[in-house]
Image (cartoon, grey):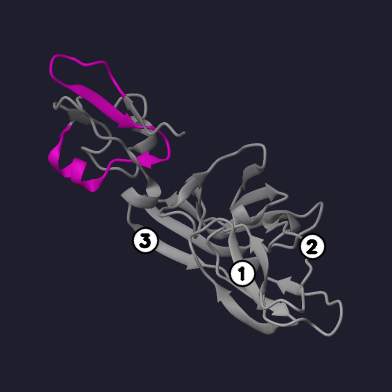
Amino acid sequence: LALTTECDPLQGSSRDCRCLPGYLWNNNFCATLQACDDGGFFQPLFSFFLPPPCQCLRWTSSGTGYCQSMLSAYTVSKSSTLPPKQVTMGAEDDLTLSFSLAAGATNVIWYLLSPEWNEAKDIRNGTEVMLLQNGSEAVLRVSSPSPDWAGEYICRYLNGGALQEWRQEVTVPLVAADVVQTPSQVSMNCNSPERVFLQCCIRNRGAALKVSWNPGAPDPVNLVGSEDPLCHFLVLVSCPSSDTTYRCTF
């Protein structure tokens, strides 16, 4: 939960509202609403990049709007993309991203755009995440990332009144915990016409997956669907010549 907007108590039929650090008013609000008499506490913070009346807006309706993240409320003047990165999985491996910042950069905000989400979400310091700004470098570290941390990372910052950004796509390989345990041994009656269905299932994280059976169907096929978990089947219509191990590979 992120707080984006601070509003003064209602005075008559209006109230003054300001954006908290890292958030901005939508351009439509800026064009249609009256400016506050006083920009308030946050005016010095935003005065260098937000022209009046968008430092503080006066709302006269019963409801008020809310400030948006810089990802959606501001036009990016410069966007740079680094090559994709794949996380190396291991007991002590972390995801570390670092982007160079222009001199005088301020208001550094990190976002993650995941294939499972309709919009990017901002990243904050927490038990798994550490955000650092060391002079002209912005650094993000995620400890022991799971595939939930896969997606496009966006680092945005203000530079002389202009919004700039870095982007980098990060993939996180599947881990053993993503595979749903199914029966490891089944029996088949060779004198019965009934077929045997083998299945393997995996957690659906919204990423593109391919799956194969060996023996049986060694050529990978796309695994699609909205179910969670996603399952793939191999139908045995006749008995193998001997006890056989079938391996499902994602």
Instruction: Please state the horizontal and vertical placement of residue 174, each as a whole percent of the image.
Output: 69, 62
Task: Return the residue nearer the eye: 197 or 38.
Answer: 197
Where is mark 2, residue-wise? Answer: 184
* Amino acid type at image mark 3: Ser
Distance from Cα at disc 2 to Cα at disc 3: 55 Å
Q: How would you rate the neighbour count of disc 1 (Cα within 10 Å): few for under 14, some for 14-19, many for 20 or more?
A: some
Residue interval drawn in magenta:
7-34
- Could you say which quadrant of the image residue 12 lies in? top left
* Residue at image point 30% right, 35% down: 66
Q: Earlier in the sequence, mark 2 or mark 1?
A: 2
Relative to 209, say whether 47 is above or below. above
Cβ–Cβ under 8 Å for marks 1 and 3: no
Q: Earlier in the sequence, mark 2 or mark 3?
A: 3
Left or right, residue 87 beside residue 44: right
From where the camera sits, is residue 38 visible?
no
Residue bearing the label numbered 3: 77
Which residue position holds label 1? Answer: 232
Asked if the stretch drawn in magenta spans residue 227, the answer is no
Residues under numbered marks 2 and 3 in contact, where contact means CB atoms less than 8 Å apart: no
Closer to the eye: label 2 or 1: 2
Q: Nearer the viewer, mark 2 or mark 3?
A: 2
**Could you give the CA–CA distance between mark 1 and mark 3, rounded to whole angstroms?**
46 Å
